[in-house]
Each structure stands twice: as C-alpha cells, then as structure tokens.
Image: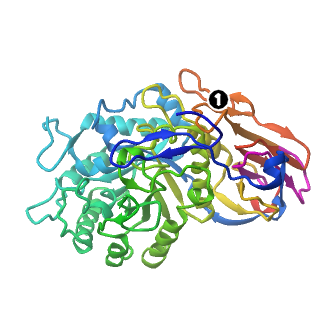
C-alpha cells in the first residue's frame, strides 16, 4: 500500500485474494477546496430537541464463537489483565458470542467430546464457557449468546433438537452467569447458502418458525431470565434479503427471509435484531459489494439506511413493543478488510453508523469484534487498541442515551453533526462532528447563552494510520491496559475550528433545557 492522500482505494481482484491499495479521491470541490479556506457551519444547541432514546448498552461488542473455541488457532485468552482493563472501559455493554461458527459448535460440559460429534465442526468446553463468563463479569458486560441451530442438533427430518442447548442454558442459569440475551442461530437468510450451512435447500420459513418455537420453549423452561433476540438476518450493502452478490451481476437466492419468518412468529422476539455490513472484504473473493475507492463517500457511509428502514418496518408490524438492535456489524464482512478495518479511516464509518442509527432510534449496535479478525477493536496478539477503540471509548464517555436534533445552517456535505445529552451533566450537550473534508471546518454555535466548550478532537497522519492523537497527543494505554487521561481542549468563544479529516466530540455545558 502507498499513501498518496487522505483517501483509501481498495481494488478487489475477482477470483483471487485482492490487493489493497491507497488511491487519490476527494469529496471537496469549488473555491473552498482550492483555496484551503475554512468552511462555516452554524448550529443552535439551545434549540435542541430529543428525538430518540437508546439503550445504556447502545455501544456493544462481540467475540466470534470461532475465537472462543479456537476454530483457527488457540482460543482467545480472556484472563489477560490488559484485555479486562481495556474492555471494562466500554461497560455497560453486551458481549455477543455468535457468528457462523456458533451454528457449528457442540456444547461439551462433561469433557467427554474430544472431537466434534457428527454434524458439528467445533466443541465448546466447560472451561471455555466458564472463562467467557468470568471475563464478562470482570469487565462489567452481559452476555448475548447465539445458540447452535445448524446441522448438528437435528433429527432425521431436520427438526431441531434442544438437548444440547438446554444443557448449556441450564448450566449457565445455575451458575448465575451474566447471560442476558439468546438468539436462535446466526443469520437465517444464509441457511441455504451451501458454503455456510449443511441445512437442506428445502428448509424454509415454516420449518424455521417451527424450530424457533421449539427453542423458545426450551429457553422459557431452563433460562427464563433471558431475552430472546432474532431473527437476525444478514444484509450486505443494501436491504436485499439475498445478500450473496457475485460480481455485482448475480444475486443468489437464499433464505429463509425475515419477511417470511416474522409473520409466522408475531410477538416472538423480545429484541428484533439484524446484521449489517456495507461491503465484503477481499477475503471473500468474487463477492460484492467491495469497498469503494473513497471510503468517506456519503453513499458508502449511509448505505445502512435502507436496511434499517426495512427492519424497522418488520419490527413495527410484528413486534412493535420490542427494541431494534444491530446485532452484528463492521465495515467489511468476511473478517474485515486488511489495511482499512483497523485504521483511522474506518472510524468515520463506525462513528457515522453509531450516530445515524442512534438518531433513528435503533436501541443498540454490536461491533464485530472486540478482539479477532481485521475488524477487532483490539489487536488479537498485542491487545493494542485500533483507532476504533478510541472512538468507542470517547463515545461511551461523552454520548448519552438521549439523542438530539439541533437546527443547523450552511452545512456542507463534508461536515456531519450529531448530538446527544451529555451523560451525567444536566442541560449539557455533546456534539459529534465529523469533518470528512480536506479543509478545516469552523462550527459557529449560535444562540448559546453560556458560551464555552470542551473539545476532544482526534486526528491521524493519514487515513491508513493505526495510531491516533487526541488534541495532538498520541493515544496509548499503559502496559496493563489502563487508558491515559482523555483531556479536552477548552474555549470560551462561540465557535470552534476542526482540522481537516478529523472528528471531534464537543461538550457544551448548560447549552439546552432539553437535557435537564
């Protein structure tokens, strides 16, 4: 890769692993871009209105079941002090254990299954589950577990059998593990995709709904304290329920679809969940869509919106009292994109996704992953934080549950502003400002009775950087994972200027009565 400007280009070569390169791109145009003059955005925090309230665990994280059972190496070591200390900063949150391997995992609480039984690929041992639970408790997280509904726990007619699931749920309940949410399988609309599932192609929505009811009966009997999430379909780059797209010209039919499942199960889900990725990584070869040349394009940043609209409609019709959650998400499916998913440029996608979905009333977003793959918040070996970890930590500390709409004016396409009530500070507002442009952006704070602000501005040398700075100081945790102090710059003027290609959390004490 070669850094040419503050833009990425990823070129996926069909039929083989692609080469990831960095190319020239720009969202800027006109005299401002040519002269480098600052742009001005005017907003009125005092007139802010609450438009949505999200869960306190809104920003949550996942660890793939493959990492827990060591599907492609040693199981993740949850006992590391650095991992606990870094993760604890993100509490409260859910820790989801799921992913494709979850449908292929046998639960062995007796220690008798040295190899997976027929129909399974992996074994979850008692020790691995205990370590996962202990980590969640030490980190202040609640567990969200994807239960195996793959080819393993099936009878000759492919009816789901609950013995294995019941053993794990009963064991977890008896131990008082922090198991809060369970879901039945992973991404049902990919069950009929042969590389993922061994389920027959004739397995449709009616059969799935039958098995959901069988699972829910088990859950209610042995783990009644848990909530039931689903159906958790996968969307990639659009609202199509058939997410497998070859070369952009052939979309393969898959299923069963959420739009066929939910009418058969009205009121079944305590949490309506779905999964979303805007693109696939080069690891998935000929599948599309791939990442665009300019990863700061508005069309890329916002392509989740149609899927959210689609799932909001299903939720409103069939489970209107249940919150809507994005149960798994990242910037690129198939393990994340090397050279992007763990770099500074990805933080703009992540923060934009969090902010836009919070404003739409999505209750929470589960990041794939905390640790593991190219999209982990933490390096799987060193546990050094990726840029997105710092974005997540700042969000946790500075963005509250109550989301605000603030009147704006003179808003260029390259500046995005979001706002919430600041947690623990009555009448205070936190503004999240994304400057996607190659020139500075000045934000004028109109109508504020008490001018003054605290700014947490994050920059990097370029979009490919793995290190970031807060107000000019590089961010790095202590050896034991303790984050450094996150100190703001302060000002008493009615404006603040953001550097080019940066983001900032701006806290304004006493700015609006809406946050009383």
Q: Is residue 44 above or below residue 16?
A: below
Query: Which residue is most to the left?
Result: 156
Q: Is residue 376 above or below residue 516?
A: above
Answer yes or no: is residue 230 visible. no
Residue 484 occupies which quadrant of the picture? top right
Residue nearest the viewer, comparing 180 with 61? 61
Structural crowding at the residue carrying mark 1, measured as other residues with C-alpha within 10 Å and reported as few (<14), some (14–19) or many (≥20): some
Percent x, y for residue 381? 42, 27
Q: Residue at x 50, y 50 (%)?
A: 291
Residue found at x 80% / y 42%: 454
Q: In the rendered view, would you say 357 is above or below 290?
A: below
Q: Is residue 150 magenta?
A: no
Position of the C terminus by quadrant: bottom right
Closer to us: 280 or 457: 280
Looking at the image, how many numbered discs can be counted on the residues?
1
> For the magenta stretch, what is the residue range?
426-453
Residue 172 at x, y = what percent? 31, 46
The quadrant in which residue 212 appears is: bottom left
Q: Is residue 364 left or right of residue 416?
A: left
Left/right placement of residue 45 relative to residue 62 reads right
- Which residue in the protein does label 1 denote? 475
Q: Is residue 363 visible?
A: yes
Please identify the quarter of the rendering in which residue 137 is found: top left
> Residue 47 location, x and y as percent?
82, 65
The foreground one among 250 and 157 is: 250
User: Residue sitting at 32 percent across and 64 percent down?
Assistant: 189
């Amino acid at each position: 890769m070669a850094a040419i400007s503050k833009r990425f280009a990823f070129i996926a070569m069909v039929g083989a692993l692609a080469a990831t390169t960095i190319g020239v791109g720009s969202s800027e145009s006109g005299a401002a871009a040519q002269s480098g003059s600052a742009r001005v955005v005017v907003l009125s925090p005092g007139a802010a209105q609450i438009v949505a309230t999200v869960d306190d665990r809104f920003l949550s994280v996942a660890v793939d079941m493959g990492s827990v059972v060591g599907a492609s190496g040693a199981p993740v070591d949850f006992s590391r002090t650095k991992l606990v200390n870094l993760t604890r900063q993100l509490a409260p949150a859910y820790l989801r254990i799921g992913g494709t391997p979850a449908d292929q995992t046998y639960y062995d609480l007796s220690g008798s299954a040295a190899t997976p039984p027929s129909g399974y690929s992996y074994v979850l041992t008692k020790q691995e589950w205990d370590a996962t639970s202990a980590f969640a408790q030490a980190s202040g997280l609640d567990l969200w577990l994807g239960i195996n509904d793959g080819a393993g726990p099936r009878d000759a007619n492919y009816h789901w059998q609950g013995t294995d699931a019941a053993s794990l749920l009963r064991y977890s309940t008896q131990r008082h593990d922090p198991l809060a949410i369970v879901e039945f399988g992973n991404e049902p609309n990919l069950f009929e995709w042969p590389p993922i599932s061994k389920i027959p192609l004739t397995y449709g929505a009616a059969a799935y709904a039958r098995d959901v009811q069988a699972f829910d009966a088990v859950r209610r009997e042995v783990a009644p304290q848990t909530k039931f999430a689903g159906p958790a379909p996968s969307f990639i780059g659009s609202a199509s329920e058939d997410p497998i797209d070859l070369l952009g010209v052939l979309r393969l039919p898959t299923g069963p679809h959420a739009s066929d499942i939910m009418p058969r199960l009205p009121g079944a889900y305590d949490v309506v969940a779905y999964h979303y990725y805007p693109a696939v990584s080069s690891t998935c070869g000929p599948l599309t869509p791939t990442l665009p040349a300019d990863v700061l394009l508005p069309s890329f940043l916002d392509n989740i919106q149609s899927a959210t609209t689609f799932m909001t409609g299903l939720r409103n019709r069939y489970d209107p009292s249940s919150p809507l959650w994005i149960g798994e998400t990242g910037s690129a499916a198939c393990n994340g994109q090397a050279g992007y998913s763990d770099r500074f440029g990805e933080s703009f996608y992540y923060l934009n996704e969090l902010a836009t979905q919070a404003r739409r009333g999505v209750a929470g977003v589960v990041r794939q992953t905390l640790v593991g793959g190219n999209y982990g918040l933490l390096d799987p070996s060193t546990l050094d934080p990726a840029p997105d970890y710092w974005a997540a930590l700042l969000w946790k500390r500075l963005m509250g549950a109550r989301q605000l709409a603030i009147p704006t004016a003179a808003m260029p396409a390259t500046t995005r502003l979001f706002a919430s009530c600041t947690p623990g500070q009555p009448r205070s507002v936190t503004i999240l400002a994304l400057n996607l442009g190659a020139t500075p952006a000045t934000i004028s704070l109109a109508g504020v009775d008490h001018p003054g602000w605290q700014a947490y501005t994050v920059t990097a040398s370029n979009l490919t950087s793995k290190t970031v700075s807060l107000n000019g100081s590089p961010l790095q945790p202590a050896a034991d994972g303790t984050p450094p102090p996150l100190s703001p710059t302060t000002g008493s003027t009615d404006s603040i200027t953001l550097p080019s290609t940066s983001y900032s959390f701006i806290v304004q004490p006493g700015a609006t009565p809406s946050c009383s």
